[in-house]
């Protein structure tokens, strides 16, 4: 009986550990001036997610006031200040703005941005469920009945 109690506690803790999916996206890019020379310095950058390559609706935005850019290269984590609460079940487009200047064209988000929503996981009919999401009377049966 002690083993069954330990197994239940282990499953509950395991469910809690994996329950929270970070709603962030790591984004790296290169920004150059009109002569093709990479920018250097610290810039305010605004990132917006839209549902279309042009026009469309703005679904999310975040301004990062101090982004370090060296030889045009930068790396940011989108969603740290404003979590990205989108379902990622359709195509999204990222618009970048540097010091008030909108860069174009928008960038189509692809597989890396969609990694935390697996199509296979969404369509599973039978599988392992977290005990945290179950309701009502739950009967656990160990080996041998």
Image (cartoon, rainbow, N blue to C red):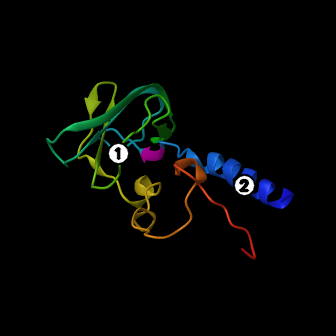
In the image, which residues are magenta? 25-29
Closer to us: 21 or 96: 21
Closer to us: 40 or 94: 94
Picture coordinates of residue 72, whole percent (x, y)? 45, 41
Q: Name the residue at 27% across, 55% down.
A: 91
Circle 1 residue: 36
Picture coordinates of residue 37, whole percent (x, y)? 39, 42
Closer to us: 8 or 28: 8
Contact? badges 1 and 2 (CB < 8 Å):
no
Q: Name the residue at 16% across, 45% down.
A: 54
Q: Name the residue at 41% across, 56% down.
A: 114
The local secondary structure at tag 1 comes to: loop
Q: What is the quadrant of residue 86 in the picture?
A: top left
Disc 1 from disc 2: Cα separation: 59 Å
Q: Is residue 71 visible?
A: no
Q: Is residue 73 visible?
A: yes
Circle 2 residue: 8
**The furthest residue to the left:** 55
The question of residue 6 being in magenta is answered with no
- The mark closer to the camera, 1 or 2, is 2
Picture coordinates of residue 100, whole percent (x, y)? 29, 25
Q: Residues within 10 Å of mark 2 (few under 14, many from 20)?
A: few
Which is more N-terminal, label 2 or label 1? 2
């Amino acid at each position: 009986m002690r083993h069954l109690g330990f197994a239940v506690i282990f499953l509950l803790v395991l469910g809690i550990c994996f329950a929270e999916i970070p709603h962030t996206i790591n984004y790296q890019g290169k920004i150059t001036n009109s002569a093709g020379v990479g920018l250097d310095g610290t810039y305010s950058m605004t990132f917006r997610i839209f549902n279309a390559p042009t026009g469309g609706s703005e679904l999310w935005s975040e301004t990062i006031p101090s982004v370090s850019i060296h030889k045009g290269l930068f790396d940011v984590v989108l969603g740290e200040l404003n979590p990205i609460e989108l379902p990622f079940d359709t195509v999204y487009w990222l618009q970048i703005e540097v010091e008030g200047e909108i860069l174009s064209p928008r960038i189509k988000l692809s597989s890396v941005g969609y990694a935390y929503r697996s199509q296979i996981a969404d369509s599973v009919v039978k599988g392992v469920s977290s005990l945290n999401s179950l309701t009502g009377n739950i009967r656990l049966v160990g080996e041998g009945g």
